[in-house]
Every structure is written in structure tokens, then in C-alpha cells.
Image: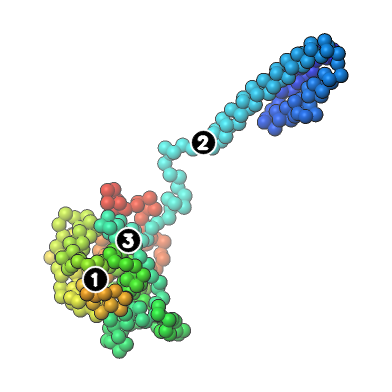
């Protein structure tokens, strides 16, 4: 091949490279020129049949073309790469300083009970509690018997229990009637049976009792607390509950009254009232929870040694304190799924309660 032809080939290839529009195009040109069967490579293969002198000069000329083409390919590829990245960045650009667009997240409302649960979880998490859960359908064994409420105990009637038609199986394998749990206390049992002390949990959830009027709904919410270790005592419980009330009602001082009471699963037991000045109604007391030292029989019922372990528990009505804190007048409205009510009393999904940022924002 003559030098002029080589020059023409070089011009042609450089032209193709310059007009390659994208990375795939560049690759095509590369294969056609420098690939195994490429035009430059094939020229190289002809060198073997040439006379030594001719081979020397022609070989150098081809090598020059090869280097030029290869450099041009690299340069063009780098340019196209850069352009592709720039185009991608431009297309995916997001202005994070823009306000949130009105949309499902902005429109939707968090139910006050969910919001209050988040607030409570935040407060107790700060004191080292974890969250535990149990099912809404329990056997009467967990809901009652292991909590030291034997069959025929009047507390079973007091709880106005919903029984299920089909019997279930208790944790230890025997047949036992299924009930809709009447309180969150069975989560105490589940936790003590499955976890080694020290235990510090809160357990929120739905509970059910056959009851319906202005202050009672057949389904309502409780939050259970349980602390078990070798030394914790009634004084720790009082402190914890007082700290909780101050954080929850967002006040520096809160008046609390522990009234002696009775629960089969705690001894001694108390019911706790808070002074209603915390919610702007001085002079009144509001009952918010039941509590007490976990009964040694209950500890033993869960396979723990009551000589070694002791602890305390409380059960709080979530709906009640939600109504108190946010001035909601009628309990039944809480569960009517009325959008107008939810828009009025509900919370934005962005109002996440934190101890630092504020509970009720
Ligand atoms: N489970 C009790 C109730 O529903 C409340 C409670 C829980 C009392 C834990 C003492 C300890 O009324």
C-alpha cells in the first residue's frame, strides 16, 4: 500500500472517530480499525511478505497511524464519557432545599393514638426500655391463669371477656380457650418466659372488653410496662412514672397520687392519679394507670425464681391520656374513622416527637 493510501485511511478513520456520537459508536470504530480483523491490523499482517527495507519504512508509517487512531479514540471516549455523566447529573438533579410537595405524605394524618404511642416510646426509650409485642388473640392461660387469675376468679367477669369459638393451644401445649386479650399484661408473661432478666420493656397494643358507652369502647389501647431484675423496687417505679408524666405532659412539676388498689398479678398494687393542673384543670385528679410489684407467683409461673428476681409493672390507658393531652372530648369519635375528625385532631407525618425537639411540636 502506498503512503498516500495510508494517509487517506488515517483521515477516514479520524473522521469516523470525530463523528462517533456515543460510546457504542466509538467502540464500533475501534473494532473496525484496531480489532483483530480491523483495517489497521490487517495492514500490519501484510508486513511479513515485504522486503526488509520496505517493511521498515512501511511498518513505521503504519505504527504512526495506529498510535494516532488509538489516541484519537481515547480522547473522544473521554469526552463522550464526561458528556454522559453530565447529562445524567442534569437529569437526576434534585433541589433538596425545596419545601415538601403537597402529596400523600403531606395530606395524610397520624392518628392521635399513634402519635401518643410514639411520644411514650420516645420517653421510655430514653430510660432504657425496649418495645415488646404480643398478639391480640391470646389463650385464657396467658391472659388470666398465669397472671394469677385462676378460673372462677371474679376478675374474669370484671373484664367482660370476648371468647372465641375455636379453642387454641397454650404456650405449654395444652388446649385452652382463645380470648381477645382484655389487657396488655399477657405480654409480661411472654417477655418473662422468653427473655432473661434484667428486663425493661414497654408493650403497646389493642385490648378488648365487652363494653360500650361514652367512656368505653369494645376495643381500646393500653401500654404495659415491665421491669424485672434482682433489686428494682417500688421507689424506682414511682420515679420512672413521675419522670414519664413530666415528659409526657411537658411540665416541670406534676402532682401524682398513688392509691392502694388490687390486681391479682401485683402485690402491693396501686392506681395512679395525676393532678389535672398538668392539663390546665386545677383541683381535679385524673386516673391514668394501674401498677404494682409483680406478684412472686407470676414470676414463678414464667419459670423465673421469685427468690432471686423481683420487679414492677404498670398498665396505662393510651386513649385516656391521649384525650387528656390533646383535649379530645368523646372516646367513641377516636375510632369512627371520620376523615374530618382525623384532619382536625391528627398529626402530620413529619411531626416526629423527640425529647429534644418537643413531644407535641
Ligand atoms: N392490666 C391491668 C388492667 O388492665 C393494669 C395493670 C397492669 C395493673 C400492670 C398492674 C400492673 O387494668
Identify the mark at residue 93; answer none if there is no mark: 2
Q: Residue furthest bottom?
A: 152
* Above or below, comparing residue 33 to residue 177 in the picture: above
On screen, residue 99 versus residue 231, left or right, reads: right
Local SS, label 2? loop
Q: Mark 3 or 1, which is nearer the eye?
A: 1
Q: Mark 3 or 2, which is nearer the eye?
A: 3
Residue at 28% x, 87% y is: 153
Q: Mark 2 or 1, which is nearer the eye?
A: 1
Local SS, label 3? strand
On screen, residue 106 versus residue 150, left or right, reads: right
- The residue under label 1 is 309
Closest to the observer, 244 or 150: 150
Identify the image quadrant of the N terminus. top right
Mark 3 Cα-neighbour bin, 10 Å: few <14, some 14–19, many ≥20 = some
Residue at 82% x, 18% y is: 47
Q: Is residue 345 visible?
A: no
Residue 244, image quadrant = bottom left
Q: Residue furthest left?
A: 283
Whether the residues at callouts 3 and 1 have beta carbons within 8 Å, the answer is no
Residue at 25% x, 57% y is: 127
- The residue under label 3 is 130
**Disc 2 Cβ-to-ligand 1 distance below 8 Å:** no
* Above or below, comparing residue 123 to residue 86 in the picture: below
Q: Is residue 264 visible?
A: yes
Residue 51, image quadrant = top right
- x, y percentage for residue 125? 29, 57
Residue 53, image quadrant = top right
Local SS, label 1? loop
Amino acid at each position: 500500500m502506498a503512503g498516500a493510501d495510508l494517509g487517506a485511511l488515517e483521515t477516514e478513520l479520524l473522521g469516523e472517530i470525530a463523528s462517533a456520537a456515543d460510546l457504542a459508536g466509538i467502540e464500533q470504530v475501534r473494532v473496525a480499525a484496531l480489532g483483530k480483523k480491523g483495517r489497521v491490523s490487517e495492514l500490519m499482517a501484510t508486513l511479513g511478505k515485504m522486503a526488509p527495507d520496505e517493511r521498515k519504512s512501511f511498518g513505521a508509517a503504519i505504527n504512526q497511524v495506529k498510535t494516532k487512531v488509538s489516541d484519537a479514540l481515547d480522547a473522544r471516549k473521554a469526552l463522550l464519557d464526561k458528556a454522559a455523566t453530565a447529562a445524567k447529573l442534569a437529569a437526576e438533579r434534585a433541589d433538596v432545599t425545596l419545601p415538601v410537595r403537597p402529596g400523600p405524605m403531606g395530606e395524610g394524618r397520624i392518628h392521635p393514638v399513634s402519635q401518643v404511642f410514639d411520644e411514650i416510646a420516645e420517653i421510655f426509650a430514653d430510660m432504657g426500655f425496649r418495645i415488646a409485642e404480643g398478639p391480640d388473640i391470646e389463650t385464657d392461660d396467658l391472659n388470666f391463669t398465669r397472671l394469677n387469675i385462676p378460673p372462677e376468679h371474679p376478675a374474669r367477669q370484671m373484664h367482660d371477656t370476648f371468647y372465641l369459638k375455636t379453642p387454641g393451644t397454650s404456650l405449654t401445649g395444652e388446649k385452652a380457650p382463645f380470648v381477645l386479650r382484655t389487657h396488655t399484661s399477657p405480654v409480661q408473661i411472654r417477655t418473662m418466659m422468653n427473655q432473661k432478666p434484667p428486663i425493661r420493656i414497654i408493650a403497646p397494643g389493642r385490648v378488648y372488653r365487652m363494653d360500650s358507652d361514652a367512656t368505653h369502647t369494645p376495643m381500646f389501647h393500653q401500654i404495659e410496662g415491665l421491669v424485672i431484675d434482682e433489686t428494682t423496687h417500688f421507689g424506682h417505679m414511682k420515679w420512672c412514672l413521675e419522670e414519664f408524666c413530666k415528659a409526657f405532659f411537658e411540665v416541670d412539676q406534676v402532682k401524682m397520687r398513688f392509691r392502694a388498689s388490687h390486681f391479682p398479678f401485683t402485690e402491693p398494687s396501686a392506681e395512679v392519679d395525676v393532678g389535672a393542673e398538668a392539663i390546665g384543670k386545677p383541683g381535679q385528679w385524673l386516673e391514668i394507670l394501674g401498677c404494682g410489684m409483680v406478684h412472686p407467683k407470676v414470676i414463678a409461673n414464667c419459670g423465673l425464681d421469685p427468690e432471686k428476681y423481683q420487679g414492677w409493672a404498670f398498665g396505662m390507658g393510651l386513649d385516656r391520656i391521649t384525650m387528656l393531652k390533646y383535649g379530645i372530648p368523646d372516646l367513641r369519635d377516636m375510632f369512627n374513622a371520620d376523615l374530618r375528625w382525623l384532619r382536625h385532631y391528627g398529626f402530620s407525618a413529619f411531626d416526629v416527637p423527640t425529647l429534644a425537639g418537643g413531644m407535641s411540636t
